[in-house]
Amino acid sequence: YFARFSAHFVQGGKMEGKSEVRLGGWLTKLGLKSGKWQKRYFMLTTVSLSYHTDIGGKLKGSIPSPCFRSVSAINPTEHVDKTACVTSLKKPIRDYAFKLFIVLPEGPRTFIMIADSEKERANWIMKIQAEIIGKPISVATNKHFDAATEATMKSKGPKFIPRSEVTDRLNILRQPWFRRAATSDEVKEYLNSSEQGAFLIKDAPTSKLGSFDLFVQTGNQSKVARLLIQKTHIDSKLCWGLRNAPVAFEHLLDFVFWYAQTKFEVMGAGEKLKLSLNLSSCYKAEQSFRKRRGTLSRPIVRPQSNKHQQRIMRQRKSSMTLEPVAEDIAENKPDEKEEKVTKEEQQQQQQHQQQMQQQQQQQ
């Protein structure tokens, strides 16, 4: 459940509600694996470029805007490489086509899209180009990332990522990787035998009040790396982020969502490694931790007042099911006095009717 939400967040599906929409409209997109041209409704926001089956329809995919690299118009005779389509095209490229080149953690990708007119194509290219110029470039891979760009990003400071809608649906205190008061022994027991990418977040020392320590299993000789999620302020807004990172987050859940898809540098056994937070490895670490402890590591604790109220309700229900039955039996039991009265009344009515009939016959 948590992994599904995190993937949806990083793709931009849940951040559009809190970001500004730049442009929206219908485009025909080339499928990467199918080679078919598919009509999709695209939404360009300050966070991502997402495409849907219809206006307000199902989200089919999304591209985080920090991954944008270049956008340009193309001709119908343009060569299509493997980053755009891995198979042969079912139909050739039409007029008013353009391509968007991006870099994701798994590698480069090219999106080829077709607008309905030259004016619409120019508008899409202009809006996307404005996002490329105004956005810090993603550091997901160092293959397409130079030192000059990184220095520019650091000089401008990190970009503030506001709280997403997902954080209202998930309780961070219930997540297995969030253990604020974990001891060093618990951290070792939790991560030493875990897979690469398993992580744990706890409170930082009191000297760095408000910050958090991030412990990550590097997978290199089972070494656990430690990073600081430092507290900072951007435009008087409280947020958290890694040191010298291009982004900072208003909520720690969003921090985890982001770095579950974006790689960051850590030191593992004397060498630098690029890792991302692995939620499935974290889940396995939690399960093995529970087995070793022989109990639930995070039991559900209910307040005593709730238990007391539940006990009272059970007693009330049991009494309500018994007492009305006894009352009903008592009410339905015939009364001897009432029976005598009803019989006398019936006899009097019969005598009165007989007298009336005799009078009518005499008349």
Image (cartoon, helix red, strand yellow):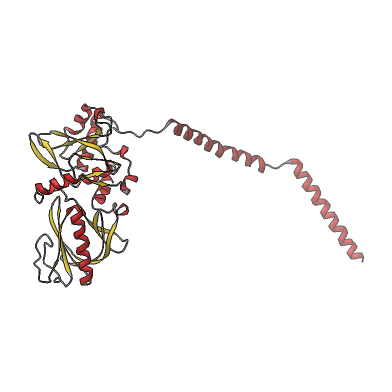
Indicate whether 62 appears above or below 180: below
- The residue shown at (82%, 51%) is 347
Residue 213 in the image, given as x and y percentages of width and height: 22, 34
Q: Is residue 38 visible?
A: no
Q: Nearer the viewer, residue 355 or 99?
A: 99
Q: How many marks?
A: 0
- Residue 41 place in picture, x, y as percent: 27, 64
Image quadrant of residue 363? bottom right
* Residue 233 percent across, percent down from the top left: 27, 40
Residue 251 visible in the snapshot: yes
**Residue reaching furthest to the right:** 363
Compared with 353, 150 (above or below) is above
Q: Is residue 138 above or below residue 311?
A: below
Residue name at image x 84 percent, y 58 percent: 353
**Residue 92, placed above or below residue 301:** below
In the rendered image, residue 6, in percent from the top left (x then y), is placed at: 25, 47
